[in-house]
């Protein structure tokens, strides 16, 4: 058969009477009064094929089944019954020649965007699920975004360089995947959580501008926007300052919006301090598509002497218009969200035509909340009450349809705390990572808890899509960082000795950022499930249903690695 002339989304009335060659999968076959119609599908779209009873290949065409792989030759005709739902809906191809490239058994899932099968079944047969136009579109958009990012960075003279996956296990950060060594029993590697140290070593090596579309691995519990393995757009630049990273990042995002999403992104992107973001929205990744701010009701509520609020450091509040959604069952749902996010309790009072209802209605009067509104109150410490109220804000925004889905909200969050204090461990942890530069290094010895980091996150519609910082490039300051985190000299030498040593040989000022490619594609394609934009994802329980992994390690492999399984 001749070379294929067209994809299955190309033919229109302009091609009438042309002889064409097509290939693809049989998506659907219909026999209507002797006329056989076939929807031929490839990755680009659908073309309707026609075979008449008098055709010499009629019997062969009648034997075709769904998902057979075929190639055909035929003439383009105008359809009598047009279909305006597809690009090729004005034409059909009268088949003159057929070649069956491969047969197929009846698939266990329907290759259709209208199916209603469970996610577990879809992931078990992911290679079939990806034949669907909707599933395929996510990965096509992912490819376009990836190439747009690469082109922007290459245009700015960045070098695409690789870093190792098998690295040394290090403290801090998320849990690591450990890879036992066959050659050295009792020793092993970790799968890289990120290329952080290596990209800084590239700067020490004098490469100045680095990027990588990097695979990263973290042994964490999964959720809708997280997987065990993920892809990071990793960027580092020497002799740079925060504004250089902001400008480059905004250029990348603007190119994605313009050339892939066909949208306008106005620059510069707004900057908001961590302190303001957390205080006003209860989150360091606020969704600014709806205007609902947290309020401090500590003093306002004190005059009512409500037992629930006695001896509480703070009472945070939200006020929204009354809505039929506010039922006892819904309040129970909100209470669970508050408790999961460390709030002490959820109280509410509703003013309906100047009649107060709710859990604290008997303690207050109508001056506390305006008519036909509801007031939510959450007591606790500043951090816990604010964090819980932020989670409540997010839920109310979704459930009350306060979010304008046509808006795109991007904001830089800056001036993060350098450290977090863990009450249980009675020690400081690095808020980002231990290579983040402080704004004032002199405070290491006087006031480490309140130090501000030269760090920044890019937030899109309430999701962190990028995070980075200026790095420590002075070995003395890097040692102070490790010591403040509680590492002994022996631990510093054992875990980071090579890196501390590298800093001695003339390290340039440098900084960078890492974007989560999976999250960017998730937001760009308007899905709320990151598994949609990953070709072969794991389930929420960290299983690959298609391959059947994780699977048992056979005894011979354990012996070779010098391992035993403890049951």
Image (cartoon, rainbow, N blue to C red):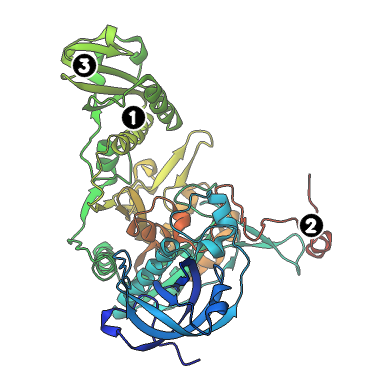
Q: Position of residue 360 (x, y in %)?
A: 31, 12
Tell me the residue at 42%/33% (across/down). Answer: 341
Q: Residue furthest bottom?
A: 2
* Residue under the point 83% across and 63% down: 556
The numbered mark, 3 or 1, whose residue comes first in the sequence reads: 3
Residue 476 location, x and y as percent? 43, 60
Number of the front mark, 3 or 2: 3
Q: Residues within 10 Å of mark 2 (few under 14, many from 20)?
A: some
From the top left corner, tell me how far across and down residue 32 is, in percent: 45, 66
Residue placed under numbered mark 1 in the picture: 382
Mark 2 vs mark 1, foreground winner is: 2
Residue 205, percent across and down? 44, 77
Can the viewer see residue 213 in this picture?
yes
Q: Name the one closer to the observer, 463 or 499.
A: 463
CB within 8 Å, label 3 to label 2: no
Question: How many angstroms separate mark 3 from mark 2 (CA)?
Answer: 65 Å
Measure the C-alpha gap from mark 2 to mark 1: 48 Å
Earlier-in-chain disc, 2 versus 1: 1
For label 3, the residue is 351
| 369 left or right, relative to 444 | left
Viewer-nearest of labels 3 and 1?
Answer: 3
Q: Earlier in the sequence, mark 3 or mark 2?
A: 3
Q: Which mark is residue 563?
A: 2
Circle 1 residues within 10 Å: few <14, some 14–19, many ≥20: some
Q: Residue at x 29, y 23 (%)?
A: 376
Whether residue 508 is visible: no
Depicted 211 relative to depicted 272: above or below: below
């Amino acid at each position: 058969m001749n070379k294929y002339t067209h994809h299955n989304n190309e033919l229109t009335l302009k091609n009438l009477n042309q002889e064409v060659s097509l290939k693809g999968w049989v998506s659907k076959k219909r026999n209507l009064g002797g006329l056989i119609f076939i929807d031929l599908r490839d990755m680009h779209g659908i073309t309707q094929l026609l075979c008449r009873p008098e055709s010499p290949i009629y019997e062969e065409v009648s034997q075709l089944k769904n998902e057979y792989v075929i190639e055909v030759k035929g003439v383009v005709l105008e359809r009598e019954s047009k279909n305006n739902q597809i690009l090729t809906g004005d034409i059909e191809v009268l088949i003159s020649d057929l070649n069956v490239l491969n047969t197929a058994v009846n698939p266990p899932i329907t290759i259709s965007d209208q199916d209603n099968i469970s996610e577990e079944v879809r992931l078990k047969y992911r290679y079939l699920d990806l034949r669907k136009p909707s599933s395929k579109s996510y990965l096509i958009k992912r490819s376009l975004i990836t190439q747009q990012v690469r082109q922007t960075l290459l245009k700015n003279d960045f070098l695409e360089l690789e870093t190792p996956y098998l690295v040394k296990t290090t403290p801090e950060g998320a849990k690591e995947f450990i890879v036992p060594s066959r050659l050295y029993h009792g020793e092993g590697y970790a799968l890289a959580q990120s290329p952080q140290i290596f990209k800084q070593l590239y700067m020490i090596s004098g490469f100045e501008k680095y990027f990588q579309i990097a695979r990263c691995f973290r042994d964490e519990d999964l959720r809708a926007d997280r997987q065990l393995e993920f892809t990071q757009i990793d960027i580092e630049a020497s002799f740079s300052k925060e504004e250089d990273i902001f400008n480059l990042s905004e250029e990348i995002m603007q190119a994605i919006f313009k050339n892939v999403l066909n949208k306008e992104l106005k620059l510069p992107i707004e900057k908001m301090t961590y302190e303001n973001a957390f205080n006003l929205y209860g989150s360091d990744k606020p969704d600014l598509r709806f205007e609902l701010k947290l309020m401090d009701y500590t003093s306002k509520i004190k005059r009512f002497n409500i037992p629930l609020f006695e001896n509480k450091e703070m009472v945070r509040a939200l006020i929204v218009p009354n809505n039929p959604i506010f039922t006892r069952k819904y309040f129970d749902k909100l209470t669970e969200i508050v408790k999961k996010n460390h709030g002490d309790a959820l109280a509410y009072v509703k003013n309906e035509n100047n009649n107060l209802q709710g859990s604290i209605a008997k303690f207050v009067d109508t001056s506390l909340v305006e008519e036909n509104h509801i007031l939510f109150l959450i007591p606790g410490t500043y951090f816990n009450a604010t964090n819980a109220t932020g989670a409540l804000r997010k839920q109310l925004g979704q459930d009350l349809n306060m979010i304008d889905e046509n808006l795109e909200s991007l904001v830089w969050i800056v001036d993060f705390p350098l450290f977090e204090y863990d009450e249980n461990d009675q020690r400081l942890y690095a808020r980002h990572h231990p290579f983040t530069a402080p704004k004032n290094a002199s405070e290491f010895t006087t006031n480490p808890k309140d130090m501000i980091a030269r760090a920044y996150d890019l937030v899109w519609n309430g999701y962190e899509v990028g995070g980075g910082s200026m790095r420590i490039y002075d070995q003395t300051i890097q040692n102070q960082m490790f010591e403040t985190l509680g590492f002994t000299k022996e631990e510093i030498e054992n875990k980071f000795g090579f890196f501390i040593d590298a800093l001695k040989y003339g390290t340039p000022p440098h900084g960078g950022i890492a974007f989560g490619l999976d999250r960017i594609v998730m937001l760009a394609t308007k899905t709320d499930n990151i598994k949609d934009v990953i070709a072969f994802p794991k389930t929420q329980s960290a299983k690959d249903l298609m391959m059947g992994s994780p699977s048992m390690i056979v005894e011979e492999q354990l012996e070779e690695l010098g391992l035993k399984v403890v049951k």
